[in-house]
Amino acid sequence: MPNAHIIGLGKSGNAAARLLKSQGWQVTVTDGNTSPKLHQQQEELIKEGINVNLGENFDPETSPNLVVVSPGVPWDIPPLEIARDRGIEIVGEMELAWRNLNAVPWVGITGTNGKTTTTALIAAIFKAAGLNAPACGNIGNAACELALEQQEIRALKIGKSVDWVIAEVSSYQIESSSTLAPKIGVWTTFTPDHLNRHYTLENYYNIKAKLLNNSEIQVINGDDPFLRKNAAQQWNNACWTSVQGKAELMGNPDLGVYIENDYIVQNQQKIIPLKTLKMVGKHNLQNLLMAVATARLAGIEPPAIEQAISNFPGVPHRLEAVGSWQDINWINDSKATNYDAAQVGLAAVEAPVILIAGGEAKAGDDTQWLQTIQEKAAAVLLIGDAAEHFFQRLKQVNYQTVEIVETMEKAIPKAAELARHFSAKVVLLSPACASFDQYESFEHRGDHFRQLCLELIR
């Protein structure tokens, strides 16, 4: 019986373990952490015949036939390097899913920001067209969950097989995928991020580019300055998009999707009117163009695209409208985990704004974010580990209406008080930080914000 070792007991680790177990592998999972939630997952997997060791790290001396790495595990830790030297195959969970699902076409969406919204838009359009095209990866189910489900459908001959796989793929997942090759690869944006993991901007770029290189067709955001400057020659026959009109298109002009006279247009054909999209922000127009381009490349007709977009509610934790209280709109943008995403979120809402920011800081250029705060924020409330650093940065640019409140519980009532004082239109959680100092994930942080807001509103 072949022996597989899974590193990391998260959503993807669970899915990979169950998939391999169902295929006759002897499976062991290790996770260096311990918590009540992990112990519960451990008990469930042990009942299924899967070994789970918490508080332990992977030991290459166990010499498994295959190692599957969860996205949060660095690709270059010493035990993995030792395993590679010994000829042990190491893959990511996304690669494992691809090997089980590559009989159907994939759309792979990557980028620094905009991935989740674009992925959700694409999945909604494909669904409206009558296709079974679930979203997976960083959105929805882990990719291996989908692979296991399809395996059961084939075995039992009950249920509908997938027509397409719509996968949001992070740089971590691309890095650990050796053969992942989507039919359509989508690149949303590129700005510095995850440099603590990838070390250099060039390395981060090359990892992202790998997905596009492996894709049969490419869709690229032509309004992203970095991509426009650095990727145009590499993919000069790709489908590029632009909110600026046809004259700004790069790549293949017949494939390109652009905005003209308040319509989304491709090769002179009006696809849908802009007013169809309900979400705010110029960045969402870019996301929409990429989703429409992907749908058209997959052969989906304009009526299905318009139906899907007109009913699209937006994405949780990305400029999510939580509710209104005393004419103040409370908006959850917890998914803004870096400066660029937070700047886009702040720019998209109506001023004046009470901004809640902070968490676990990332490397990056905060210049444009600070400038947008000066233009739009009446006050800033800071939480988490980055609070003191953000406080000093704001003072350095002579922004004075800033206060460290430390926790979300303190931020919400203070935001309500300040919103009334400054007649603010919006209270916005847009942290510009990861969440792991105080929360399990950006979803956990956003859920807490939403819960506290709803308690106040009610």
Image (tube, rainbow, N blue to C red):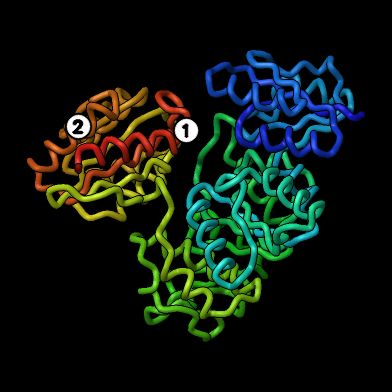
The numbered mark at residue 325 is: none
Q: Position of residue 207 (x, y in %)?
A: 66, 44
Label 2 neighbour load within 10 Å: few <14, some 14-19, many 20+: many
Residue type, label 1 = Ser
Q: Which residue corresponds to mark 1?
A: 441
Q: Nearer the viewer, residue 295 or 161?
A: 161
Quote the CA–CA distance across marks 2 and 1. 25 Å
Q: Are marks 2 and 1 in contact (CB under 8 Å)?
A: no
Quadrant including the C terminus:
top left
Quadrant including the N terminus:
top right
Residue type, label 2 = Val
Q: Say above or below: 129 vs 314.
A: below
Q: Which residue corresponds to mark 2?
A: 402
Q: Position of residue 19 (x, y in %)?
A: 76, 39
Q: Is residue 43 visible?
A: yes
The answer to which quarter of the image holds residue 235 is bottom right
Say which residue appears at 61% left-offset and 46% top-offset. Answer: 137
357 displayed left or right of 374: right
The answer to which quarter of the image holds residue 52 is top right
How many marks overall?
Answer: 2
Choose the circle earlier in sequence order: 2 or 1: 2
Q: Position of residue 327 (x, y in %)?
A: 14, 52
Say which residue appears at 38% left-offset and 38% top-offset. Answer: 447
The answer to which quarter of the image holds residue 171 is top right
Q: Nearer the viewer, residue 179 or 245?
A: 179
Q: Is residue 376 visible?
A: no
Label 1 neighbour load within 10 Å: few <14, some 14-19, many 20+: some
